[in-house]
Structures are given as C-alpha cells and as structure tokens.
C-alpha cells in the first residue's frame, strides 16, 4: 500500500477530520488540499511511529464561496495571515483561499498548489493532501520526511513566518525538527 493510501486510511478514521472536510467542501468549489502539521506530522506518525498531532485542520481551497456557512456554536476569527479560522470546541479549521497564499502573492506567482509548495517556510511543510484526489503531492516535503530532516524551503517566507511567531528561523527549524525527532539543517 502506498503512503497516500495509508494516509487516507489513517485520516478517514478521524471523525473530526471528516467534519472538517465536510466544512471545507461545502464552503468552496474546485479542489481542496489539507496542509500543514496535520499532514506532515501524521505522515511522520505513519512512517516512524511518532506521536499523532492534536486535531486542527488547515485547508487551501481553490474557489471559496462568497459567504461561509459556519456550524452553530462555531466562531469565525482570522489567522496570522488574515484568512478565516473557524474555531469549535474540539478543534479549529484554517480556511485559506489559494489566491490569498502569502508566498504566492509575495513572489507574484499564479495561484497554483505547485507554487504554494515551492513557497512554504519549511521543507516538511511542502507536502499537501488532495482531498478529492486522495493523494499526497509534494516531492520536497516527502523527501524531507524520508530524510528525517527539517530545513528552510523558502528562506524569505521562513523569516516572515518566524517573525509572526516571534521566533528566529533557526528556532522554528529546531522546534519542528525536535517535535518530529528529525535532524535540523541550517
């Protein structure tokens, strides 16, 4: 069984994931990708039996609906980049329109998932899960996971990300590597 199928099997057992996907799919048109720690940390869990991450879900959506339909009891906030963050009692959902990706805007690129992948702050973040296709995409991130290493992917984006977290780029790399049991590469 390939890693995309293993990842799909793991995530499909998570009721919170199913609810989060339902939300993302019913508030957008086109493709939807799961991104961030939920992807690379669950992949590390599958590959190296590391601890599973806490539930929070970050999605990039191709075409968001003009108005979000939010479940009763949930609150809409903004994340660090000004995109909707839907907060419930058990977990949150970052809902990121593809055209609002900071690194794509900064580099003046066409909004594509491939351009997102080249602009993530860290190498391990450069892997996404296509919800409709049920497939992992991102050679840089998959290679970083195979190498068990965390490095800068887009140095300028890492500096922006670190600044928003009030950390240095080196601290971000080290903390992420330590969390996964990987080696930090500076």
Image: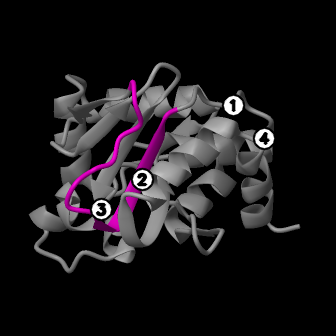
Q: Which residue is mark 3?
A: 119
The residue tagged 4 is 48
Of the two numbered discs 2 and 3 in the rendering, the one whose residue sits closer to the viewer: 2
Pointer 2 or 3: first along the chain: 2
| Residue 62 picture location, percent across and down | 34, 71
Quadrant position of the C terminus in the picture: top left
Magenta span includes 69? yes
Q: CA distance from mark 4 to mark 2?
A: 24 Å
Residue 51 forms part of the magenta stretch: no
State the residue position of label 1: 52
In this view, the mark in front (1 or 3): 1
Q: Can residue 183 be seen in the rendering of this structure?
A: yes
Label 4 – label 3 distance at C-alpha: 26 Å
Looking at the picture, how far across and down is residue 173, in whole percent? 41, 36
| In the foreground, 161 or 71 | 71
Q: Which residue is mark 2?
A: 59
Q: Please report contact status of discs 1 and 2: CB closer than 8 Å, yes or no.
A: no
Residue 83 position, x and y percent, is 21, 46
Look at the image and tell me whether residue 126 can be seen. Answer: no
Which dot, 4 or 2, sits closer to the camera? 2
In the rendered structure, the answer to whether residue 33 lies left or right of residue 111 reads right
Count residues near mark 4 (Cα–Cα under 10 Å), then give few for <14, some for 14-19, many for 20+: some
Kindly report the distance in space between the C-alpha atoms of the residues bearing marks 1 and 3.
25 Å
Q: Kindly check if marks 2 and 3 are in contact, taking CB atoms under 8 A apart as contact.
A: no
- In the displayed structure, would residue 46 be above or below residue 165? below
Numbered circles on residues, count: 4
* Element marked by disc 4: helix
Q: CA distance from mark 1 to mark 4?
A: 11 Å
Mark seen at residue 136: none
Q: Which residues are magenta?
A: 56-73
- The first of marks 1 and 3 along the sequence is 1
């Amino acid at each position: 069984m390939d890693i995309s199928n293993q990842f799909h099997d793991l995530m499909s057992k998570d009721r919170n994931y199913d609810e989060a996907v339902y939300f993302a799919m019913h508030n957008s048109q086109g493709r939807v990708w799961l991104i961030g720690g939920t992807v690379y940390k669950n992949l590390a869990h599958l590959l190296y039996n590391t601890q599973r991450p806490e539930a929070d879900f970050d999605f990039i959506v191709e075409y968001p609906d003009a108005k979000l339909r939010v479940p009763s009891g949930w609150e809409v906030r903004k994340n660090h980049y000004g995109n909707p963050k839907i907060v419930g009692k058990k977990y949150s959902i970052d809902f990121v329109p593809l055209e609002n990706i900071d690194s794509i805007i900064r580099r003046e690129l066409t909004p594509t998932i491939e351009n997102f992948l080249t602009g993530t702050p860290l190498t391990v973040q450069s892997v996404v899960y296509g919800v409709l296709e049920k497939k992992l995409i991102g050679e840089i991130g998959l290679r970083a996971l195979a190498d068990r290493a965390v490095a800068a992917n887009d140095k300028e984006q890492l500096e922006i990300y670190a600044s928003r977290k009030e950390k240095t780029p080196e601290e971000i790399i080290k903390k992420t590597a330590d969390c996964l049991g990987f080696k930090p590469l500076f």
